[in-house]
Amino acid sequence: MITGIHHTGLSVRDLDAAIAFYTRERSFTLLYRFEIADSDANRTMLQLPNAGARGAFLQGALGCLEIFQFSAEWDGDFGEREVYTAGIRHICLQTGISDALFDAMCASGASAHARPAGLGTGNSYAYIRDPEGNLLELEGTPWAPPAATRSWFAHTALVTPDIERLSGFYAMLTGIDVHQRGSFGPDRKFDIVAGIADVQFDGAWLRLANAELEFWQYRQPATISVARRNAAEIGWNHLCFESDDIDADYARLAAAGVEMHGAPMKFGVARVAFGRDPDGNIFELLQPGPSAGVTVGAMLAKPDGQLIDTARTAYRSVAAGAAA
């Protein structure tokens, strides 16, 4: 069974600079560095002709980052990586409603087309790009617990040319149904946040224990379809789900015809398996070993995790009651 979103993977040109950026404002903490050998098993696992890489694992309040700098330079087209380009498009960090994180990240080398703005939901929103151009969303929430000591991972967003197909796939993978859908725009408020004139798009959300998956299909401008994802390509490169029985989940997905890179294998203190969603994005299944300290349950049990989960659960309960 899938227990939550364990981490989102990012491929970068400069590992040390990426670690410095993502840990500077304490959104994430560096746990350890690692190396991936260019072995036959690792080439199969990642579907790369050269799997050699240096990496780092960063822990956040409710989700983690895994950052790679591959030994072989990516020789493909980086593309524009527009907001409406298909793929794993951004992660979202939440805080209380304040521009403090936005200003600090911009001072640390991020760029933005607009300052945080509202959409009529009571939250504030801003898209920024890290120093290598990777997209992040910063979201201010009215329910943020004042005692929380740092921002927290809230969701990973995927842009797709077929939102029904992709959201349905991840509902099958996780065993959790989409809980909300909507269509948005045209509206000047959305134009400001997205940085696109007359933007229109459809959205869907799927809620796991620690965080959400967010899906977007842009109508205006239309989602840009992309070639099959290469793990070494610069940008958000995979999405990892924690499993409490990786063999059962692997067998279930393989029986459903899901493309898998190979059977589960040991990697560090965990067992992992990689596969592809219908858009060609890479996903990972991970079952932590007994000595692994970073699990979805452990993150939710830490003081910040408890504070955030309690506050957002209460907020959702009130919102659900008001909508009933």
Image (cartoon, rainbow, N blue to C red):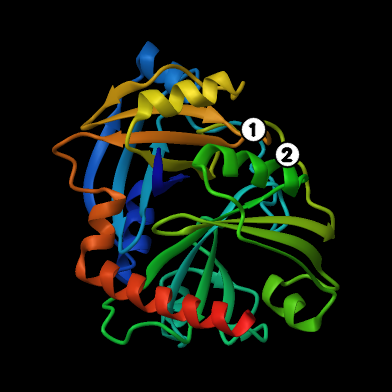
- Disc 1 marks a residue whose amino acid type is Gly
Where 103 falls versus 138 (above or below)?
below
Outermost residue to the top: 40
Where 47 falls versus 311 (above or below)?
above
**SS type, badge 2:** loop
- Residue 9 image-quadrant placement: top left
What's the residue at 74%, 46% (across, down)?
164
Is any part of residue 29 visible from this angle?
no
**Which image quarter is the C terminus in?**
bottom right
What's the residue at 19%, 41% (across, down)?
292
Tell me where residue 85 appears, x and y as whole percent.
Answer: 71, 50
- Residue 166 image-quadrant placement: top right
Dot 1, crowdedness within 10 Å: few (<14), some or many (≥20)?
some
- Residue carrying label 1: 280
Tell me where residue 95 appears, x and y as whole percent.
Answer: 41, 78
Where 140 falls versus 276 (above or below)?
below
Is any part of residue 296 visible from this angle?
yes
CB contact under 8 Å: marks 1 and 2: yes
Tell me where residue 229 appears, x and y as whole percent.
Answer: 61, 34
What's the residue at 39%, 11% (across, down)?
40
Tell me where residue 8 appears, x and y as whole percent.
Answer: 44, 48
Q: Compare residues 54 and 127 and report the one nearer the observer.
A: 127
**Which image quarter is the N terminus in?**
top left
- Residue carrying label 2: 226
What's the residue at 78%, 47% (across, down)?
224
Where 232 falls versus 123 (above or below)?
above
- Disc 2 marks a residue whose amino acid type is Val
- Tally of numbered tags: 2
